[in-house]
Amino acid sequence: MRHSIAVTVALCAVLLASTPAWVQPAPAIKSTAVELPAGDALFSGGSSADAINNNCLACHSADMVLNQPTLPRSIWEAEVRKMIKVYRAPIDESDVPAIVEYLVKVKSSD
């Protein structure tokens, strides 16, 4: 019995002994150029777009918003409310109707 314990301890010592590590070469890191769309475009519409330009462009490009599907007024209203409540968008309550109206005008299925 002592012999088998001694053999087991010796085997464990051999297995746990320092062994050379298998080191993989470091991957080559290359810079990649990425072209992003221009983010300085405003919503068109003059003063009717003031509320959406002043509130929504802080987080979204005009193109991103205008590439959304056409939706009914109720969904646009819910989306603006979600931006305020969930994502903490600092949209003044008095600007919500004008933002929704703009979205309904340009992207509504109503």
Image (spheres, grey):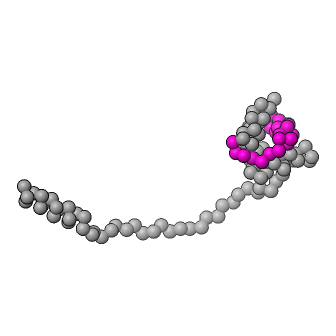
Give x and y (percent) for residue 11: 17, 62
Does the magenta-highlighted stretch encompass residue 94? yes
Q: Nearer the viewer, residue 17 or 38?
A: 17
Count numbered badges in the picture: 0
Q: In which quarter of the image is the C terminus?
A: top right
Toward the right, the furthest residue is: 47
Residue 9 in view, yes or no: yes
The residue lying at 64 percent from left, 64 percent from top is 33
Residue found at the far top of this picture = 110
* Figure quadrant of the N terminus: bottom left
Task: Report which quarter residue 103 is drawn in.
Answer: top right
Q: Nearer the viewer, residue 48 or 44?
A: 48
| Residue under the point 77% across and 31% down | 74
Identity of the residue drawn at 33% across and 68% down: 21
Q: Where is residue 2 in the image (x, y as percent from the top left)?
A: 8, 58
Question: Closest to the observer: 88 or 76?
Answer: 88
Identify whether 33 is placed above or below 69: below
Q: In the drawing, does residue 58 fall left or right of residue 50?
A: left
Q: Where is residue 54 in the image (x, y as percent from the top left)?
A: 84, 50
Q: Where is residue 9 in the image (x, y as percent from the top left)?
A: 16, 61
Kindly tell me whether residue 71 is visible in this rendering: no
- 32 drawn magenta: no
Residue depicted at x 92% and y 46%: 47
From this view, report whether residue 36 is shown above or below residue 69.
below
- Classified by dominant secondary structure, the portion drawn in magenta counts as helix
Classify residue 18 as left or right of residue 30.
Answer: left
Q: Specify the segment rendered in magenta.
A: 86-108
Indicate left or right for 5 with 101 as reference: left
Q: Which residue lies furthest to the front in this view?
A: 2
Quarter holding residue 10:
bottom left
